[in-house]
Image (spheres, rainbow, N blue to C red):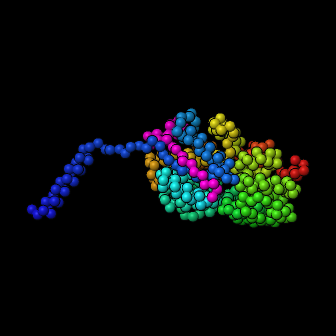
Amino acid sequence: MSIGRAFIHIALAIAATAGLLSVAAPHSVAAQPTEVLIGGVYPLSGPTAPAGKDQREGIEMALDIINGSYDLPLPFAKSQGIPNLGNARLRYIFSDHQGQPEKAFSETERLISVEKVSAIQGAYQSSCAATASQASERLLVPFIADTGTSTTLHRRGFKYFFRIAPHEGQYAENFFNYIKEIDTQRGKRTASVGLVWENTLYGRDVGTEDRKWAEKYGYPVVADISYTDRTTDVTSEVQQIKRANPRIILHGSYVSDALLFLRTYKELEVNPDMIFGHASGFVNEAFVRELGKDADGVLVWEIWSLDLAGKQPLVATVNDLFRKKYGRNMNGHIATAFTAAFVLADAINRAGSTDPVAIEKELRKTSIAGKDTIMPWKGISFDENGENTQSSGLICQIQKGEYRIVWPTAFKAVDVLWPLPRWAER
C-alpha cells in the first residue's frame, strides 16, 4: 500500500473513532451566561438630559421586575431573569450621546464592539436614533427605539431596526382629527393654524406631517416657522407668529426650546385658542415644573398617562413601585423605555440565546398582548419595517400641573378647557 493510501486509511479510522466517541459521549452543553448585556444610548447630559434620565429610570424599574420576583401580571415578573437562559440577569450598559448624532453613532459602535452587547435601546432624539441604528445595522445588532418619532426612521429598509411607539404622522393626524371634533362640538370652524418646528430630523418631520394633515383637513396654515434647535432667543419667531395670528399653534420642540417659546408667548401677549405640543419637550416633567400654572391648558400628544389606571389597574401598581423607588410619577418617556426593555427580554427569552442575529429573528415574531403592558395599545407586533402595528396615542391637557387624558373617548378622564384663557386672565 502506498504511503498516501495508508495515510487516508489512518485518517478515516481516526474520523470513525471520533464519530463513535461523539455518539457515545454525553452531549456537551455550552455554559449558560450569567447575564445578558444590552446597550442603552441616551442623552444623559446636555439640554435633553432630563428625558435621558427619565428613560434610564424606566429601564432600571423594568430590570428590577425582570431580574427580581414580583407578584405582577407582567412577563418575567414572577421568575428571576431570563428563564430560557438559566435565569440569566438582564443588564444595561448606559452610554451618554449628549444629544449629538455623531456621538450616538460612535457610542453604539463601542457598546457593540467593545462591551459586546446583544442589542441596543435608545436614543430619545430622532437624529440620534437615526445614526445609532445605522451603526447597529452595519454590525448586525438589533436596535429598539422606545422613542424617536421621525417617520423616516422606519422607511430606510433596515433589518435590525424596531420601534414600539407611534411616529409623527400618527401624531399629526390625531391632532387634526381632534381639532375637527372640537370644531364640530363648538359649531365653529378653526380659522387658521401656525406651525413651529425645530430644524433637526424630529422637527422637520413634525413640520412636514403637520403641513400635510392641515391640508388634508382643510385648515389654512398662516405661519410655518423653522428655528434652530437649542436657540437662546425666539423673539423674532414669536413676533412672526403674533403678526400671523393663528388660532391654533402646533409645536415640535425639545424641552429648553418649548420653555423659551411659552415664556416669550406670555411676554409678547400671543394668545391663540390652543397650543398643541408634539410630545418631546412638552411631556418632559421640567416643562410643568419650570412653567408652573403657565403650562396649564397646553394640549400634548402623549403615549402614556396615569389616568390609564382607571381602565388598567396594572398602571397604578407599576407607578406605585416607580414612585417608591424614585419619588415621582411615571411619564410617557419612562413608560415606553420600561416597555421596550420587556420587549427585548421577551425576544431574548424566545431566542434562548445572546446572539444578536437570533434575537433579531425573534423580535420580528413578537406578539405581546396589550394587557401584558402598561401602555394604551392593542399590543406589540412589528411589520416588515420594524414598526409596531398596534401602537396608538393619547391627547392630554395639562390641568393643575397634571397630564389629563381628553382624547380618545375610551380613555377620556376630564373635559378639555378650550379656548385657552388670555395670559392676562390666568
Quadrant in the rendering for residue 27? top left
Is residue 422 shown left or right of residue 358? right
Name, please, the residue furthest toward the right.
424
Q: Is residue 357 above or below residue 319?
A: below
> Quick check: can you spot residue 213?
no
Residue 317, above or below 282 = above
Question: Which residue of the protein is positioned furthest toward the left in this rendering?
Answer: 1
Count of numbered circles in the view? 0
- Which quadrant, please, contains the N terminus? bottom left
- Whole-percent x, y for residue 393 in the image: 68, 51
- Residue occupying image coordinates x 47% and y 41%: 88
Q: Residue 247 colored magenta?
A: no
Q: Is residue 93 magenta?
A: yes
Give percent across and percent down for residue 399. Answer: 79, 44
Q: Closest to the observer: 5 or 389?
A: 5
Q: Residue at x 29, y 42 (%)?
A: 26
**Quarter of the rendering containing residue 321:** top right
Q: Is residue 284 visible?
A: yes
**From the viewer's perspective, is 17 left or right of 132?**
left
Residue 410's spot in the image, x, y percent? 71, 46
From which residue to which does the magenta span run?
A: 76-100
- Observer-nearest of 311 and 238: 238
Q: Residue at x 64, y 47 (%)?
A: 53
Task: Please name the residue shown 63% across and 52% down the image.
Answer: 43
Where's residue 309, x and y in %? 68, 39
